[in-house]
Image (cartoon, grey):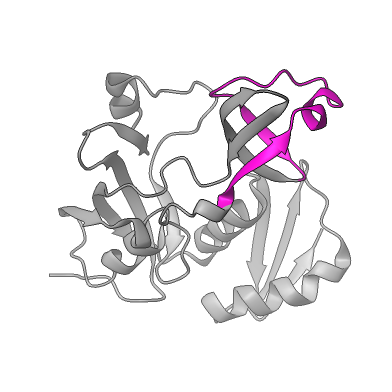
């Protein structure tokens, strides 16, 4: 029996749902997304590659992956503290309606808004004031995750590609690794050279065989 330990890179399939309502809110499986009505044609479905212990997924899910058997389906329940956090009353704020008018936004309940860089949901609007909830939409909810660790990832280029995709949200990376040096480049994103040193440090901590990252 092969189990996962902290620091391993693994390929992961998962589905998350609200524990009580049994409503799916996230999945890597396209067939589940279509069946449950959350399919987004712009989303990329399929297994994701993560480094266990780096919180590339929810903290509670990340903790539960450690020690689990590869190739077996697992189901876990997560409390709000381990998932999307408790509801924080301080994050429910009353904001003057004219702040939205300046941006050409007509406040209405259910509308997602950006207020000074913070994303929130309008709960109520009227009397020149707007009540906005800046909590995560799933804050306060118990959730259930079903997941399968499909395989351990051993290829350093695959590991590095996963880290780059997770950090920079870009998929098309050209990667070559030779003599401990990883050369990376992307047509979609030009990384400044001053990132080379901190990126090298981060990558080396997780992939020790890579001693240097060179930006193309």
Please report the bounds of the magenta region as a residue range.
91-116
Horizontal arrangement in the rendering, residue 209 relative to residue 106 (left or right) = left
Q: Is residue 179 visible?
A: no
Q: How many marks?
A: 0
- Residue lying at the far front of the rendered structure: 127
Q: Is residue 215 visible?
A: yes
Check the image and report above or below for 19 versus 62: above
Spot occupied by residue 61 in the image (x, y as percentages of width and height): 33, 59
Give the quadrant of residue 209: bottom right
Give the quadrant of residue 97: top right
Magenta-drawn stretch contains 154: no
Spot occupied by residue 51 in the image (x, y as percentages of width and height): 44, 66
Spot occupied by residue 10 in the image (x, y as percentages of width and height): 37, 61
Identified at 31% across, 45% down, the residue is 14
Identified at 61% across, 73% down, the residue is 203
Check the image and report above or below for 87 versus 125: below
- Residue lying at the far left of the rendered structure: 1
């Amino acid at each position: 029996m092969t189990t996962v330990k902290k620091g391993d890179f693994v390929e992961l399939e998962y589905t998350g749902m609200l524990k009580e309502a049994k409503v799916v809110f996230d999945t890597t499986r396209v067939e589940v997304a279509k069946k449950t009505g959350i399919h987004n044609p712009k989303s990329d479905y399929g297994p994701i590659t993560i480094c266990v212990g780096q919180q590339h997924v929810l903290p509670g899910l990340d903790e539960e992956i450690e020690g689990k058997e590869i190739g077996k389906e697992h189901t876990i329940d997560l409390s709000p503290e381990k998932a999307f956090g408790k509801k924080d009353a301080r994050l429910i704020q009353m904001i003057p309606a004219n702040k939205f008018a300046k941006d050409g936004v007509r406040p209405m309940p259910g509308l997602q808004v950006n207020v000074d860089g913070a994303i929130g949901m309008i709960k109520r609007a009227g009397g020149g004031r707007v009540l906005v909830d800046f909590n995560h939409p799933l804050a306060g909810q118990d959730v259930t995750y079903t997941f399968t660790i499909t395989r351990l990832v051993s290829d350093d280029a695959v590991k590095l590609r996963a880290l780059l995709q997770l950090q920079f949200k870009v998929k098309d990376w050209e990667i070559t690794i030779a003599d401990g040096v990883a050369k990376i480049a992307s047509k979609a994103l030009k990384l400044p050279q001053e990132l080379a040193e901190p990126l090298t440090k981060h990558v080396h901590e997780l992939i020790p065989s890579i001693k240097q990252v060179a930006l193309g």
